[in-house]
Image: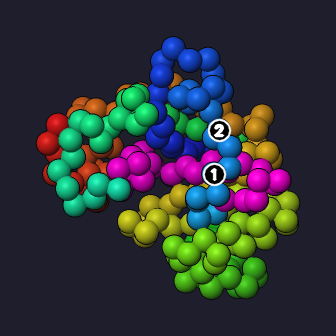
């Protein structure tokens, strides 16, 4: 089993798989670096550690004091939830941190690190076309943080969402995320 983390705006009162629930997968927005064409599959961006997941949610405000409003989206508190994926499905995630994988797929590291979607989306499309379930790459915040993109059409029944926890000043991973982003706590 593989364990990943997700941050999302949480409404405790909505049914599972509805907006603001842990299992809600937004439709493709075409804004993400590794989004697939709408005809293929929505994608779910996850992190391998809780602090990385939180940092991704807070990054628009980096180098500023972290305040309570930064921990809300769309009128809801942000929550952290673990996402479990079966070992068989996790084996179908292409590891773009592995030099041998990059050589075999003829992908240059600067293509993965690019912020230009015209360079990164073809990588995701190629991995989709090869029948895999997602990809893994390093974070632009820290090289030892890794993100995972799951092609949800291929793993829908295999993902299990844990119990969400609202993110607040007492969330240990919040301190690590804020530190990585240069955000002094001002909660």
Q: Residue furthest top?
A: 13
Name the spot of residue 98 as percent of width and height, x first: 62, 74
Secondary structure under tag 2 reads loop
Q: Residue under label 1, please give it.
A: 29
Span colored in magenta: 35-59
**Colour scheme in use:** rainbow
Q: Relative to 70, is 123 above or below?
A: below
- Residue 89 appears anywhere in the view: no
Q: Relative to 186, is 124 above or below?
A: below
Q: Quadrant of residue 129?
A: bottom right
Q: Residue at x 52, y 36 (%)?
A: 82
Q: Residue at x 62, y 85 (%)?
A: 108
Please tell me which residue lies in front, 50 or 28: 28
Q: Residue at x 76, y 67 (%)?
A: 125
Give yes or no for residue 40 being in the magenta stretch: yes
Distance of mark 1 from mark 2, alpha carbons?
11 Å
Work out which quarter of the rendered image holds the N terminus and state it.
top right
Mark 1 is surrounded, within 10 Å at the Cα level, by few (under 14), some (14 to 19) or many (20 or more) other residues, namely few
- Residue 32 appears anywhere in the view: yes
Work out which quarter of the rendered image holds the C terminus and state it.
top left
Q: Residue under label 2, please give it.
A: 25
Q: Is residue 69 left or right of residue 152?
A: left
* Label of residue 75 in the image: none
Name the spot of residue 7 as percent of width and height, x first: 46, 40
């Amino acid at each position: 089993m593989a364990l990943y983390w997700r941050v999302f705006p949480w409404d405790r009162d909505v049914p599972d798989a509805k907006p603001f629930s842990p299992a809600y997968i937004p439709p493709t927005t075409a804004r993400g670096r590794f989004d697939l064409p709408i005809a293929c599959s929505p994608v779910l961006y996850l992190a391998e550690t809780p602090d990385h997941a939180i940092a991704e949610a807070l990054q628009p405000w980096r180098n500023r004091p972290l305040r309570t409003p930064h921990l809300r989206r769309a009128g809801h508190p942000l929550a952290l939830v673990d996402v479990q994926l079966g070992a068989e499905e996790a084996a179908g995630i292409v590891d773009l941190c592995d030099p041998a994988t990059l050589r075999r797929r003829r992908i240059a590291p600067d293509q993965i690190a690019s912020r230009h979607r015209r360079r990164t989306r073809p990588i995701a499309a190629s991995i989709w076309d090869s029948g895999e379930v997602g990809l893994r790459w390093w974070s632009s915040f820290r090289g030892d943080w890794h993100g995972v993109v799951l092609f949800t059409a291929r793993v829908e029944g295999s993902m299990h969402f844990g119990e969400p926890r609202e993110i607040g000043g007492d969330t240990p991973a919040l301190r690590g995320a804020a530190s990585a982003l240069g955000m002094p706590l001002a909660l």
